[in-house]
Image (cartoon, coloured by chain):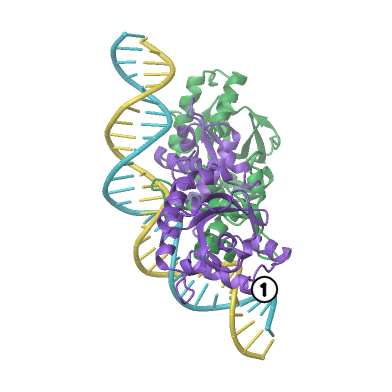
Chain colours: A purple, B green, C yellow, D cyan
DNA sequence: CGGCACGTGCGACATTGTCGCACGCTGACC
DNA sequence: GGTCAGCGTGCGACAATGTCGCACGTGCCG
């Protein structure tokens, strides 16, 4: 079939599927016939579109229809409950392995909202942070979330980069450089930007297609997170990034 | 990156792009960074999404935003003016080569609307059909449009398959079989289903991803369209299908 | 006026999507 | 109630396809 080179065939086809489904509920065969595709190919496209929530399948008639994900494009996107649900188990394991407290965060408006919090194993003198709002520019979680979300950076900068300690990044340029490093490494390190003597290590949690929807990280005294040269301890970084990948896999896996 | 096998990567990625753009206008670089993709890949996805109308590019800032095509999923889709515009030149050439009158049609509600009409070269005693509504189940144009649009078939059947001649297909089963043949061949032949002594040959005009958006065909006396065994003359079929492919290519090409 | 960073395009490679085939299953017709 | 046709689904091999590195031209900022 005539196909314009330089354009991605499967995306064109999926848009055709969506336009077809806009007209009404259809069976796999009908879609395949309408687009002159083998059943397998049409089914593969439908499976993918279903996975990302753009189409849904009627459990009774086996017909496909447009999904809620299309409408949510105007809204927020993934809801936070799902993120928390998927991350629960992994967060406990991370706390056990790293020996530090664990937080899971997501971006809401211009703040980092803590959707889950696990205490440090051997220390019960901590306050539950779940639901609390943190400043994106001064925390490891925030750095990760900002690094993969350009509009949020603008908002944060316009809101003013408030200084909490001497090391808080208050200049837009410093912040941009830190976010660039974060992207390059795939994880963030924040040292005494929020509270003196404390720091954090965090990594991104991704959804379909690599979209960053949250962050997971540990926090604790600088001397436990870093070596004498203020570099993050590799073992801890590995634990954090491995956990983030695990949650990502979980999130991209079986649909709720 | 962790990627679930059996699902189509590029579609997942494009949905991530759309979700990102839902948050605000973004530059290519920002999207690439957010999804950890090379600029080229992000640009390729964006180019495709722009082509199908799901995203648009701000001519000034070069930023990308969500396009109107997403909203039009609820509407009709391609508007008929564009179809007519693209088909104009080709229709004249088809009339010249085939020596018959040419019609271009599209489906509106449960009827075939004639969006363009070219008279037969050597015969001026004809009425202009542009804008007229034809029955889908009794015309070559209609057969093509129904063959690739299952919901429309249901509607047509429910509306009742009115008989215009002795050969009109009035049984849902006969109609379904005729549509199946049409799909297999890629073109339709209608003989005396609408007017005695006359018939038509038509082929589908497709848009992005193979979606059928219209049909183009010729009509005339049966003895000129068919041989003695009432089979369509191959030369005429070639002219019609070649023209349909040309319009398809034109439609998938430069965006208005 | 120089330098940087961005959007864009091309080409080669290797990954990826496509397609043919087969399995169970449901529903219809006899 | 039995049989058969048609559907949705899944797997595997192949080749077409999407991806990625690189380079060009351009506009903005310094």
x and y percentages locating residue A154 in the rendered image: 68, 64
Residue holding disc 1: A171
Q: Can residue B118 be spotted in the picture?
A: no
Label 1 element class: loop
Chain of the residue that carries numbered disc 1 in the rendered image: A
Near-viewer residue (C16 or A114): A114
x and y percentages locating residue B119 in the rendered image: 65, 40
Near-viewer residue (B108 or B58): B58
Compared to residue A130, the image places residue B219 above or below, namely above
Compared to residue B13, the image places residue B232 above or below, namely above
Quarter holding the C terminus of chain B is bottom right
x and y percentages locating residue B45 in the rendered image: 53, 57
x and y percentages locating residue A104 in the rendered image: 54, 53
Near-viewer residue (B234 or A233): A233
Residue name at image x 49 percent, y 64 percent: A187
Structural crowding at the residue carrying mark 1, measured as other residues with C-alpha within 10 Å and reported as few (<14), some (14–19) or many (≥20) = few
Q: In this figure, what is the number of numbered marks? A: 1
Q: Can residue A227 be spotted in the picture?
A: yes
Q: Residue furthest right?
A: A159
Residue name at image x 57 percent, y 21 percent: B157
Near-viewer residue (B95 or B52): B52
Residue name at image x 48 percent, y 49 percent: A10
Quarter holding the N terminus of chain B is bottom left
Compared to residue B94, the image places residue B126 above or below, namely above
């Amino acid at each position: 079939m005539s196909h314009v080179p330089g354009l991605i065939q499967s995306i064109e086809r999926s848009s055709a599927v969506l336009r077809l489904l806009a007209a009404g509920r259809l069976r796999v065969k009908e879609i395949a016939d309408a687009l002159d595709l083998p059943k397998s190919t049409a089914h593969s496209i439908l499976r993918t579109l279903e996975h990302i929530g753009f189409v849904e399948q009627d459990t009774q008639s086996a017909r496909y229809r447009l999904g809620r994900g299309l409408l949510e494009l105007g809204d927020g996107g993934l809801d936070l409950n799902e993120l928390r649900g998927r991350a629960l188990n992994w967060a406990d394991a991370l706390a056990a392995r790293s020996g530090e407290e664990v937080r899971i965060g997501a971006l809401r408006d211009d703040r980092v909202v803590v959707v889950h919090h696990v205490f440090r194993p051997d220390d019960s003198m901590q306050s539950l942070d779940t639901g609390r709002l943190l400043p994106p520019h001064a925390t490891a979680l925030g750095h990760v979330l900002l690094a993969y979300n350009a509009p949020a950076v603008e908002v944060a900068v316009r809101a003013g980069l408030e200084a909490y300690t001497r090391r808080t990044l208050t200049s837009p340029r410093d912040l941009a450089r830190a976010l660039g490093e974060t992207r390059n490494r795939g994880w963030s390190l924040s040292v005494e930007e929020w509270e003196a003597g404390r720091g954090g290590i965090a990594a991104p949690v991704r959804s379909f297609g690599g979209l960053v929807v949250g962050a997971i990280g540990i926090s604790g005294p600088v001397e436990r997170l870093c070596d004498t040269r203020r570099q993050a301890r590799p073992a801890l970084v590995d634990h954090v990034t491995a956990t983030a990948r695990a949650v990502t896999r979980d999130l991209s896996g079986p649909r709720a």
